[in-house]
Structure formats: structure tokens, C-alpha cells
Image (tube, rainbow, N blue to C red):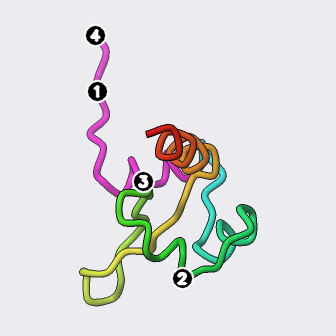
Amino acid sequence: MQTQKNTTDGDREREIARSAKLLKQAELARELGVAENTVRHWKDCPRVYIGKSANGKARRVRYDLDEVKAWLKQARSC
């Protein structure tokens, strides 16, 4: 009989982070040659939230470069 491991949101987030090179906002902006403010204002841009702050509310935002490039390509074709 196979047992199923219970996974938490934190486990899932760590798995995502390991499987993809996730970039901080400044790193993404540098890779794409745009200003950080531009990235900050992309409301529908795909992003991943990692961890929690000490107060349990805020999370760190990270971006998968390939996902963002695909999103930009689709947005430009509309």
C-alpha cells in the first residue's frame, strides 16, 4: 500500500522554487531590459509568492523568466 505524503503550501512553494529559476523583481527587469517600475506595474504578469513574513501576511514575489516572456509574447500579439 502506498502512502500519500501530505503537502503544505510551503512545500509546494519550495518545490516550485527548486524546479524553476525564480528571479527577484530587479533581476527580471535587468533580464528584460526594462525599469523595475515597469515590472511593478504589470498587474497580470505571472508571479510566484514564496514564504511569509514575520507577521504572516506579506510574501516575497518571484518571477519565472520563461513564463514572463511567454506572457509578454501573448500580450503583444493581442
Task: Give percent across and percent down for residue 10.
Answer: 36, 57
Mark 4 or mark 3, earlier in chain: 4
Which one is closest to the eye, mark 1 or mark 4? 1
Task: Choose between 36 and 53: the one closer to the eye.
Answer: 36
Question: Residue at horizontal 43%, vertical 53%?
Answer: 46
Q: Neighbour class for label 3 at 10 Å: few (<14), some, many (≥20)?
A: some
In the picture of the structure, the residue carrying the numbered disc 1 is 4
Which one is closest to the eye, mark 3 or mark 1? 3
Mark 3 or mark 1, earlier in chain: 1
Q: Which stretch is magenta?
A: 1-17
The disc placed on residue 70 is none
Label 4: element kind: loop
Q: Tell me which corner region of the image, top left, top right, bottom left or bottom right, holds residue 43.
A: bottom left
Judged from this view, the residue extending furthest toward the front is 78
Whether residues under marks 2 and 3 lie with C-beta atoms below 8 angstroms apart, the answer is no
Measured in 3D between alpha carbons, the distance from the residue under mark 3 to the one under mark 1, in whole angstroms, is: 18 Å
Measured in 3D between alpha carbons, the distance from the residue under mark 1 to the one under mark 2, in whole angstroms, is: 43 Å
Image quarter of the N terminus:
top left
In the picture of the structure, the residue carrying the numbered disc 2 is 37
Judged from this view, the residue extending furthest toward the top is 1
> In this rendering, is residue 53 above or below 32?
below
Task: Choose between 56 and 44: the one closer to the eye.
Answer: 44
The disc placed on residue 13 is 3
The amino acid marked with disc number 2 is Asn
